[in-house]
Image (cartoon, grey):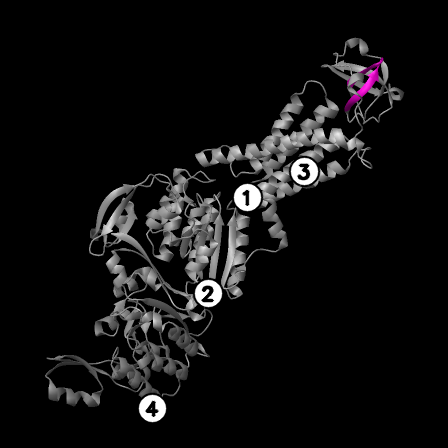
C-alpha cells in the first residue's frame, strides 16, 4: 500500500482533480477522472452558457483515461437570497439538451441535489445519467412559476426524459403537468409507469398484477421514495456519501471554482500570535478578497498559535466558506505550531515546505480541561462541516490522544483513529487496527504530514505552490492598508528589537541632558509604538505596560530622589527587562519546550538591545561633545589626569567647588582641588556652577548650587 497524489492537468495549467487517497498504485491509475461543477439556481441569465463553457473546457480531461468514463457532477446549489424554484424554461432546456447531446458521449453525468430541486431545474436533473440526493430532500414539482403548461413544455420534458431514461417520460410529464395522470403498474415481467391510455397496451404483452395511481399531480418525490422507484441512483447528502456511491475518493468531488474561468488567487498572511484582533482583521481581508472576485485564497501561515479559542473561531469560519465559490489552501513555509495547526487543517487543502513544522507544542499550553473543550468544538464544527475524521488533526495539537493506524478492508484506505472515534463509526467493523501513532501532540514536517494525508502537497517555495495549482499571472496580495502593514512590520522580531534599542538609547540620552529634550521624546515614542504593536500582535497587555512604567519610576527615583543604595535602581531595571521580555511573548512562565526556547530568544533580544545601548553610550560620550552643533547636549569629561578616584570622605561636607560637567543629575566637580564624581541633590546643574557638598552617602557626594546652600 502507498499513499498517492494524482494531479490531472490540461493545456492551460488549471488543476482539475487533486486526489489524495490511500490506495494501491494500480487503483489510482485506474481511477476515472472526475470534476464537480456548481450549478447555481435558479437557472436564469447566462448560467446555462457559463456551465456549458466550463464543461467544454474540461472534456479532454474527462476523456483522458482510456476505458474509463469520466464523471461530471453537477451540484445544484440554490443561490443565497434568490427564488431557486423559478428557473427559466428556455435556459433549462438548452442546458438539458447540451447534457444529452453527443458532445458528452463517454462522460457520465451526475445530478447531485443536496437540497432537492423543483421548478425547471428538474429538467436539467432529468438530463443526467444519475440523480443523487438525500433521503429527505424533494425532487419536484416542475411547474413552479409556470401558470400555464403548454404542449411545447410537455414535449420538452418527454424528449429529455426519453434521451436519458433516468426517469420515465410519463413520470417527467407528471412532475410538470397538474392535469396529467401516471399509473404505476406491476406485471409478471416487472414494473412500469404509464399513462392511463397506455394501460391496455401493457395488458396485451404482460399479466398485470397491480395498478397504482400516482396522484395528485404534479408529482414530487422525496429521496427515499425516488430511490424505491429507481429514479434516484444514490442517496447522498454529504460529499463522502456521494463519493462512496460513485466509488471515488472524496477529494475528487471537491468543487473547483477554477473550472468556471480559471483561478483568481489572493494571498492572505497569518503571522504572530492568534489574538482576537488579528483573527478579526484576517477574516475581513479574506471577505474583501472574495467579494472582489477571488476564488482561490492562499492563507500563508507563520505562527506558533497563542489562543486556541481564537484559532477555533477562524478554523470554523474557514470550514464554513462555500467550497463551490472559493478554494482555501493553507501554505506553511516555516511553522504552524500549536493551535495554529487547527487553522491550517481547516482549509480545503494544506501545502507545506519540506522542513516546515505542523503542530506540536506552541505558544499556548493546553491542559486537559481545555483539550476536551477544543476536541468538542472541532468535532462539532470543522470535522462535521468537512465530513472528515477528527482524531489525526486534533492529535497535532492536543496532548494525551492515543491514535491507531487503521486499514479499511477491501479498499486499502488508511486512516488514523482514536478508539473513541472508531467506535462511533458505522463502518467500524471494516477497519483493521494497526500500530499506534504517537505520542501527541504530533510535530510533523512536510513530508510526514504528506504521508499521513494531512498535506496535499510539499513545495520547496511559493513558486512550487503556484505550479501545483496552475496559478498564473500576478497574485493579489490581500494585505491590509498601510497602517496595518506598518503594524505587522513593527511587530516583527527584528524591528521590535530596533525599537527597544532606540527607546533605551533615547532614555539614556535624556538622563544625560537637562529638562525634557529630544532623547526623552524619541524614547517615549519608541516605547509607545513597541507596546502598541505587541498588544495588537497579541503578546502584550496592561501587565507589561504597568511593569515597564513601575520600573522607569523606580530608576528615576533612584537617580533623582533617593540616590545611594541602588535597590530601587536595580529593581527598576529588572522590572523594565521583565516587561520587555513578556511583551514579546504570549505567556508569563514557560511551560513547555517551545515556550522555553521563545523566552531564551526574548532575553537575547532584550539583552542585545541593552548591550547596543552600552556601546552607543561609549560612542556618545566620546564623539558627541566634539560634534559641531551637538556639543551642548553632552559636554566632554575632564581629562583623566584631573580625576581623583579616591573614595570621598565625610569631611567633604561643607566643602565648595565648581562643576566641570553637567550634573544630570550625576557628573563631576572640582572640590578642594580634586575632581570627584558628584550628584545633584535637586535640579540639573550646568558646568561651571559653584556648588557646595551637603552630604556624603553610600560613597556618593551630594552637592547643591552655592546660592541654595
SS assignment for the magenta stretch, majority: strand
Tag 1 residue: 538
What whole-number distance in Å separates the C-alpha atoms at marks 3 and 1?
22 Å
Task: State which quarter of the image contains the C terminus.
Answer: top right
Q: Which residue is mark 3?
A: 502
Q: Quadrant of residue 537?
A: top right
CA distance separating discs 4 and 3 = 84 Å
- Indicate the position of residue 656 as horizontal and vertical percent values: 86, 15
In this view, 420 is above or below 605: below
Closer-to-camera residue (686/561): 686
Q: Is residue 356 shown in magenta?
A: no
Find disc 4 in the rendering and name its residue: 151
Q: Do labels 1 and 4 touch, CB within 8 Å?
A: no
Q: Earlier in the sequence, mark 4 or mark 2?
A: 4
Query: Magenta stretch: residue 670 in it?
Result: yes
Secondary structure category for the residue under label 2: loop
Q: Which label sits in the foreground, 1 or 4?
A: 1
Q: CA distance from mark 1 to mark 4?
A: 68 Å
Q: Calculate the distance from the C-alpha at mark 2 to the C-alpha at mark 1.
A: 33 Å
Report, in whole angstroms, how far the alpha carbon at label 4 lies from the one at label 2.
43 Å
Tell me which numbered mark, 4 or 3, is placed earlier along the sequence: 4
Which residue appears at 37% of the width and 47% of the height? 447
**322 and 330: which is toward the camera:** 330
Magenta-drawn segment: 666-677
Q: Nearer the viewer, residue 489 or 320?
A: 489
Disc 2 to disc 3, how far (Cα)?
45 Å
The residue beneath circle 2 is 263
Quarter location, residue 338: top left
Residue 548 vertical position relative to residue 72 in the rendered view, above or below = above
Answer with the quarter of the image where residue 633 lies.
Answer: top right
Amino acid at each position: 500500500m502507498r499513499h498517492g497524489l494524482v494531479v490531472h492537468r490540461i493545456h492551460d495549467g488549471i488543476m482539475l482533480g487533486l486526489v489524495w487517497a490511500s490506495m494501491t498504485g494500480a487503483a489510482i491509475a485506474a481511477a476515472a477522472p472526475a470534476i464537480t461543477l456548481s450549478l447555481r439556481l435558479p437557472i436564469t441569465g447566462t448560467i446555462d452558457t457559463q456551465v456549458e463553457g466550463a464543461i467544454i473546457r474540461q472534456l479532454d480531461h474527462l476523456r483522458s483515461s482510456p476505458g474509463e468514463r469520466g464523471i461530471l457532477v453537477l451540484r445544484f446549489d440554490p443561490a443565497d437570497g434568490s427564488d431557486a424554484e423559478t428557473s427559466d424554461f428556455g435556459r433549462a432546456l438548452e442546458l438539458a439538451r447540451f447534457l444529452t447531446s453527443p458532445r458528452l458521449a463517454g462522460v457520465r453525468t451526475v445530478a447531485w441535489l443536496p437540497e432537492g430541486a423543483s421548478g425547471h431545474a428538474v429538467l436539467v436533473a432529468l438530463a443526467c445519467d444519475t440523480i443523487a440526493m438525500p433521503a429527505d430532500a424533494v425532487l419536484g414539482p416542475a411547474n413552479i412559476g409556470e401558470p400555464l403548461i403548454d404542449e411545447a413544455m410537455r414535449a420538452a420534458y418527454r424528449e429529455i426524459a426519453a434521451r436519458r431514461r433516468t426517469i420515465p417520460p410519463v413520470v417527467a410529464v407528471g412532475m410538470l403537468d397538474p392535469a396529467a395522470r401516471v399509473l404505476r403498474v406491476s406485471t409478471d415481467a416487472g414494473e412500469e409507469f404509464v399513462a392511463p391510455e397506455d394501460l391496455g397496451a401493457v395488458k396485451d404483452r404482460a399479466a398485470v398484477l397491480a395498478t397504482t395511481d400516482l396522484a395528485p399531480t404534479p408529482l414530487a418525490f422525496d429521496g427515499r421514495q425516488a430511490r424505491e422507484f429507481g429514479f434516484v441512483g444514490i442517496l447522498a447528502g454529504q460529499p463522502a456519501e456521494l463519493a462512496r456511491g460513485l466509488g471515488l475518493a472524496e477529494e475528487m468531488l471537491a468543487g473547483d471554482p477554477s473550472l468556471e474561468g480559471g483561478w483568481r488567487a489572493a494571498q492572505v498572511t497569518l503571522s504572530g500570535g492568534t489574538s482576537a484582533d488579528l483573527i478579526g482583521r484576517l477574516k475581513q481581508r479574506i471577505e474583501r478578497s472574495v467579494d472582489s472576485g477571488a476564488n482561490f485564497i492562499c492563507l500563508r501561515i507563520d505562527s506558533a498559535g497563542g489562543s486556541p479559542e481564537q484559532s477555533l473561531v477562524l478554523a470554523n469560519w474557514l470550514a464554513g466558506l462555500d467550497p463551490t465559490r472559493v478554494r482555501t489552501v493553507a501554505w506553511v513555509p516555516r511553522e504552524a505550531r500549536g493551535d495554529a495547526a487547527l487553522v491550517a487543517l481547516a482549509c480545503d487543502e494544506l501545502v507545506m515546505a519540506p522542513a516546515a513544522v505542523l503542530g506540536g507544542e506552541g505558544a499556548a499550553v493546553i491542559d486537559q480541561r481545555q483539550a476536551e473543550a477544543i476536541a468538542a468544538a472541532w468535532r462539532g464544527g470543522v470535522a462535521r462541516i468537512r465530513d472528515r475524521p477528527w482524531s489525526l488533526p486534533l492529535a497535532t495539537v492536543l496532548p494525551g490522544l492515543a491514535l491507531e493506524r487503521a486499514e479499511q478492508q477491501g479498499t486499502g484506505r488508511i486512516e488514523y483513529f482514536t478508539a473513541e472515534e472508531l467506535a462511533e463509526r458505522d463502518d467500524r467493523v471494516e477497519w483493521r487496527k494497526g500500530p499506534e501513532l504517537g505520542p501527541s501532540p504530533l510535530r510533523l514536517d512536510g513530508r510526514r504530514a504528506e504521508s499521513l494525508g494531512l498535506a496535499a502537497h510539499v513545495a520547496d517555495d511559493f513558486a512550487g505552490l503556484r505550479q501545483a495549482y496552475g496559478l498564473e499571472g500576478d497574485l493579489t496580495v490581500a494585505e491590509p492598508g498601510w497602517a496595518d502593514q506598518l503594524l505587522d512590520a513593527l511587530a516583527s522580531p527584528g524591528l521590535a528589537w530596533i525599537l527597544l534599542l532606540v527607546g533605551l538609547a533615547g532614555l539614556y540620552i535624556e538622563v544625560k541632558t537637562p529638562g525634557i529634550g529630544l532623547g526623552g521624546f524619541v524614547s517615549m515614542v519608541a516605547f509607545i509604538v513597541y507596546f502598541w504593536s505587541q498588544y495588537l500582535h497579541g503578546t502584550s497587555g496592561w501587565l507589561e505596560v504597568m511593569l515597564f512604567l513601575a520600573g522607569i519610576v523606580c530608576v528615576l527615583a533612584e537617580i533623582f530622589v533617593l540616590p545611594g543604595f541602588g535597590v530601587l535602581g536595580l529593581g527598576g531595571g529588572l522590572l523594565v527587562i521583565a516587561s520587555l521580555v513578556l511583551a514579546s511573548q504570549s505567556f508569563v512562565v514557560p511551560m513547555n519546550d517551545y515556550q522555553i526556547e521563545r523566552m531564551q530568544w526574548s532575553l537575547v533580544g532584550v539583552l542585545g538591545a541593552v548591550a547596543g545601548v552600552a556601546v552607543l553610550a561609549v560612542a556618545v560620550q566620546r564623539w558627541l561633545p566634539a560634534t559641531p552643533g551637538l556639543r551642548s547636549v553632552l559636554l566632554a569629561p575632564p581629562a583623566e589626569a584631573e580625576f581623583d578616584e579616591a573614595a570621598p570622605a565625610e569631611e567633604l561636607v561643607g566643602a565648595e567647588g565648581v562643576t566641570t560637567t553637567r550634573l544630570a543629575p550625576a557628573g563631576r566637580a572640582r572640590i578642594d582641588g580634586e575632581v570627584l564624581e558628584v550628584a545633584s541633590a535637586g535640579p540639573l546643574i550646568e558646568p561651571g556652577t559653584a556648588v557646595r557638598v551637603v552630604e556624603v552617602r553610600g560613597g556618593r557626594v551630594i552637592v547643591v548650587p552655592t546660592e541654595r546652600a
